[in-house]
Amino acid sequence: MQTHEPDVTIVGAGTAGCYAAATLGRAGYEVVIVERKTADEAGHIACGDALKGADAFPEAIPKSHIEPSFTNTDVDHGRFEIPQEDAVLDIPVPGELAVIDRLEYGKLVIEGAEQAGTDIHYDTVVNDVEQSDGRVTGLTGKRQGEPVEYLSEIVIDAAGALSVLQDKADLAEATFDTNVNYSQFSSAYREVVEVDEPVEWQDALVLKPTQRAAGYLWYFPRTPTEINVGLGFQMSEEPMELVQALRRDLRERPEFKNATVKDKLGAALPTRRPYDSGVAPGFMAIGDAAAHVNPTTGGGIAGAAYAGKYAGEAAIDAIDEGDVSEDALWEYNERVMDHFGGRYAALDVYNVFVGATGLNNLTGLLAALPAAKLSDALYSGSATIGLPLKIRTAIKSFGHWKTVFDLYETKREADRLLNHYEDYPDSPDGFESWQAQRDGLMDVIYATTGASAKY
């Protein structure tokens, strides 16, 4: 068996893995990324291609390096189609937004990691995780069909949703979040299609609820004539035939007549709160592997980039100190929660609400809500609605007042949860107490929404 001994082994050459590797490589550390795909296929990932926060990326792979993949920077709002109400709701999206060519973007972040000194081992499948006294010390697998072993100070899991590493490692004694199951994820399928004429909504991200299964369709314009079209549904619901459901909707849209399919791919993605802790001795999880995704929109690129940066910097400090314990890696958890983790956890409350309320009730209400405030809620985890807007909303939402009241109560509890995440502990010592208080807040949320427990 061939053995490699880099300072850090990273599994997965996606956004999170490449930013972690570039952060470490630029600081002079030896890093290997283990990637299951071939060099040709690496970077080919199922994605909606919409990028929120396109103005800010960590300097390890700067925005200027990945900007050639930004194919549409004119998008500035979401367009919600609500067939049940025969309504279309345009909602502004705060901050810089872009639609990207995901394959080109994937190749560029890999190139950025390589330029920082990262060695990427393609066509390498991880079979097991090695541990000693509870600490993760390495990996075993096959590289181009031959047995291979990686021994490192730290292993970083950037292998995506429902990562196999977390199944193979024994993390029962660590703070690492193992309260994870398939029902907290969505299944998604997308195609890239070319149409004959420019679409009229080329400056918008189009979203439309599916007829069942708590899902939605999306139409994101990479260019005026190249569209990323897709469909996703919550895995807690009855399965959907994704390809057939997407095909039916495409047939009903005249702009897609004679469209040509250029690419197709499916994936799972988290629609849950970020992991309470993404660390164990010698081990960190980042990006989709730690649910670093906005649970209401599915957007995860910017969060993954910063999670990679924070994990890389935590690894540098731990290796320099000769201590890769949970305590030594804990700053990674703190920085994630401070930057976006608490906000995403609060946003997940609205997923709980939708699951309990049902799409029909909610879509009927959507057309009555103030668009700007709804946008704030989708991206900040909270929004304040003044008295005049409350009055106008109450008038417009006649017939949905119970849903409005339930949403108001849910928002109040989401705000309380967000405040609790601002007190995330600064060491593992306060973690159990913090979790217990958070779980108490979630019990109130379940009671308020009438939802079954998600965690």
Image (cartoon, rainbow, N blue to C red):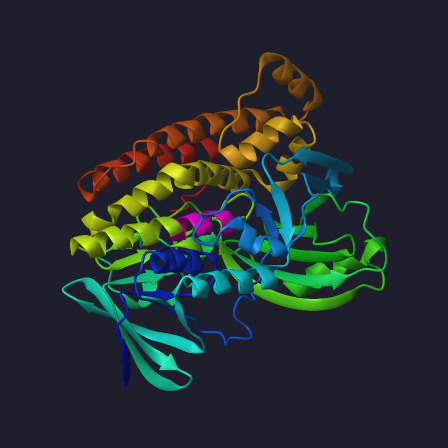
- Answer above or below: position of 269 versus 454: below
| Residue located at (41% from left, 77% from top) | 124
Q: Quadrant of residue 30?
A: bottom left
Vertical comparison of 306 with 389: above or below: below
Q: Is residue 407 left or right of residue 184?
A: right
Residue 73 visible: yes
x, y percent for residue 111:
50, 64
Q: Nearer the viewer, residue 278 or 34?
A: 34
The residue under the point 36% across, 57% down is: 26
Residue at screen point 40% across, 76% down: 125
Left or right: residue 46 versus residue 427 is right
Provide residue 114's location: percent of width, then percent of height: 44, 66
State the count of labels: 0
Is residue 48 found left or right of 156 in the rendered image? right
Q: Residue furthest top?
A: 387
- Point out residue 347 in the picture as x, y percentages from the top left corner: 48, 38
Residue 306 within the segment the image draws in magenta: yes
Q: Which residues lie in the magenta part? A: 300-308
Main SS class of the magenta portion in the image: helix
The one of 397 and 251 positioned closer to us in this rendering: 251
Residue 292 visible in image: no
> Which quarter of the image is occupied by the N terminus?
bottom left
In the image, residue 284 lies in the stretch drawn in magenta: no
Up-down: is 60 above or below 403?
below
Report the residue at 17% width, 62% height from top. 134
